[in-house]
Amino acid sequence: MAAPAAAAAAVGANRCPNAVAWTASGVVAYAAHRTVALWRPDGHDDGGCGRGHARLVGHTASVTAVAAVDAPGRSVLISGAADHTAVLWLASTADMYTLVATLRGHTDAVVAVAGLAATDDALWIATASVDGTVRIWRATWTAAGIKCKGVFCLVHSMR
């Protein structure tokens, strides 16, 4: 079996991406320094390199976590970073995302994020931080935009 071809995606960021997610529309989103880089691997089945096409700017420190959530009628990316925040990105097209909310509350780096589409107009988000907490958030879409609310904070302690 032949080894897969290596593709270089120059996004002007770190050389060691530490988080990656694949959206239902076929876009690979990965941590690239203070941004989330988007890459569409067109031609991946024949050794092609695909195309890097965008960087999502919204964090002030290195991105440490990325998750993709496909809710009915919308596609969302969630990123977490060393700046103590998580960011929600809503797909404006199949290949582009817009920052719609910044979740604040952690006192140290956010190192893991996850999302669950609850209903057509709501999304549950979980964020974990080096500060020893897991926070649960609820994002709701309304006619006026998105509303995010922290609903629970689990403090992890070793016994």
Image: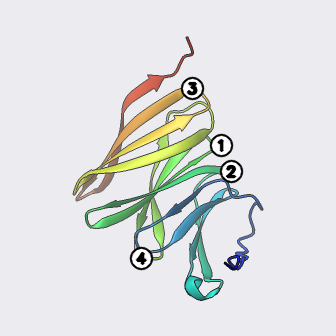
Q: Residue at 47% across / 43% down in the picture?
A: 103
C-alpha distance separating marks 4 and 3: 35 Å
Q: Amino acid at mark 2?
A: Ser
Report which quarter residue 11 is drawn in.
bottom right
Task: State which quadrant residue 112 falls in.
Answer: top right
Q: Which mark is residue 94?
A: 4
In whole angstroms, how far apart are the C-alphas of marks 4 and 2?
25 Å
Label 4 element class: loop
Q: CA distance from mark 3 to mark 1?
A: 14 Å
Q: Badge 3: how crowded within 10 Å, few (<14), some, or many (20+)? A: some
Mark 3 touches mark 1? (CB < 8 Å)? no
Q: Quadrant of the C terminus?
A: top right
Residue occupying the point 63% across, 43% down: 83
- Mark nearer the viewer, 3 or 1: 3
The residue identified by callout 3 is 132
Residue at which label 2 appears: 62
Q: Is residue 96 above or below residue 110?
A: below
Contact (Cβ within 8 Å) of mark 4 with mark 3 = no
Q: Between residues 75 and 157, which one lies in front from this camera angle?
A: 157
